[in-house]
Amino acid sequence: MTRPFNFSAGPANLPEEVLQQAAAEMLDWHGSGMSVMEMSHRGKEFISIYEHAEADFRELMAIPKHFKILFMQGGGLAENAIVPLNISRGGLADFVVTGSWSDKSQKEARKYCDVQIAATNESSAHTSLPPPATWQLRRGASYVHVCTNETIHGVEFQELPDLKALGCDAPLVIDFSSHVASRPVDWSKVGLAFGGAQKNLGPAGVTLVVVREDLLGHALPICPSAFNYKTVADSDSMYNTPPTYAIYIAGLTFQWLKRQREGEATGIAAMEKHNLAKAKLLYEAIDHSGLYVNNVSKDCRSRMNVPFLLRDASRNEDFLAGAKARGLLQLKGHKSVGGMRASIYNAMPLAGVEALVSYLQEFEQKYA
């Protein structure tokens, strides 16, 4: 039976190969007699799962040795508090607000440090990005926070800002929750990156934090021990019971990513090529239509989250009903912006985007 194509923004679709392997191993992981959900997080079986997952993620993302990889809980929203608790030192933190998620981040951080909005795209209704040269960065800031892909508004930094080129010595913190592992990361520009797994890496429940070692050990006294990056790093993410099954599924997803091929490209490089092809196909279909519109500036359109409006909003419910009947699920846009949104994460095959484009054209012809 062919599975429907799930365009949910998160929790999102997982690679079918990963789901099949998890199903096969559900009752007995590698002859252990246990499901991964039943294992002690300190037992040799789960430790091997964790070590392989960490090593595969480091290899996939080409993460340098002077960065620690932490498997945490609480999602990206919790990191909005955990980051300033760990690296703000109660001082200054500058935020670039480009949509709903970065706005949530700056509001949460105000509880722990002196926050300034260094730049915002609010005047464009979050449909463009403020050029880094215009950012008002403060001397002495503990960090600069950027959400590199805004899931709701569909804007993405095509390149990471180079703070050093802007005369800023603060580490760059990136929330890459909704496009992690969809493209390479230039770690020379990053001090800390965090992301929930439930869009590109696995199920909800585990949060990946990649933090430069020199940023460890500066947590505020009020920081809970389980959220202290140094404590978590020193205990190999085992200070408290980690989300074991979510880490296991993430590990299977890392293995799936390593198997990706596109010409001579492998892993993340191959995945980026797949994602560029999917996004190009969908945006061209929207741009060439008379019924659909995407208002995001073309130089910062997200490869992962494609919001679009029907010019005749009275057809929205008919559109969604027809999509569901064709096995095209979860296309309704976020309530704050309305319209539609197709999230085309790593696990969305090209065939899914082709099916959506075919339906877009069919629906438009119906109401032409």
Image (spheres, rainbow, N blue to C red):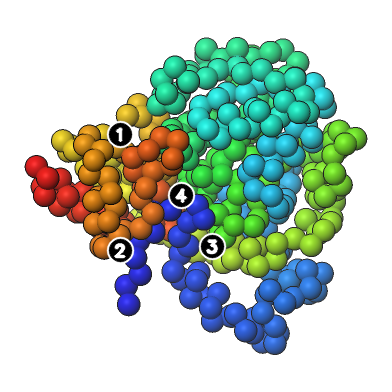
**The N terminus lies in quadrant:** bottom left
Q: Residue at x 80, y 21 (%)?
A: 91
Q: Earlier in the sequence, mark 4 or mark 3?
A: 4
Q: Is residue 52 above or below residue 199?
A: below
Q: Residues within 10 Å of mark 3 (few under 14, many from 20)?
A: many
**Marks 4, 3: nearer the viewer:** 4
Amino acid type, residue under disc 4 in the picture: Ala
- Mark 3 element type: helix
- Does label 3 or label 1 sit earlier along the sequence? 3
Residue that numbered label 4 is attached to: 9
Judging by the rendered image, the residue that carries numbered circle 1 is 294
Do callouts 2 and 1 mark residues in contact (Cβ within 8 Å)?
no
In this view, the mark in front (3 or 2):
2
Question: Pointer 2: what residue?
Answer: 327
Separation of residues labelled 4 and 3 (CA atoms)? 18 Å
At horizontal 72% and vertical 52% (from top left) the residue drawn is 72
Secondary structure at badge 2 equals: loop
What amino acid does circle 1 point to? Asn
In this orientation, which residue lies closer to the viewer: 21 or 184?
21
Q: Residue furthest right?
A: 221
Which numbered circle lies on residue 253?
Answer: 3
The single residue placed furthest to the front in the displayed view is: 314
Mark closer to the chain start, 2 or 4: 4
Circle 1 crowding by C-alpha within 10 Å: few under 14, some 14–19, many from 20: some
Q: CA distance from mark 2 to mark 1?
A: 23 Å
Report the amino acid beneath label 3.
Answer: Thr
**Residue 101 x %, y %:** 56, 35
Q: Residue visible at 35% across and 61% down? A: 5
- Mark 3 or 2, nearer chain start: 3
Question: Is the Cβ of the residue at disc 2 closer than 8 Å to that at disc 4?
Answer: no
- Find residue 264 and report its horizontal and vertical position in percent: 39, 54
What kind of element bears circle 4?
Answer: loop
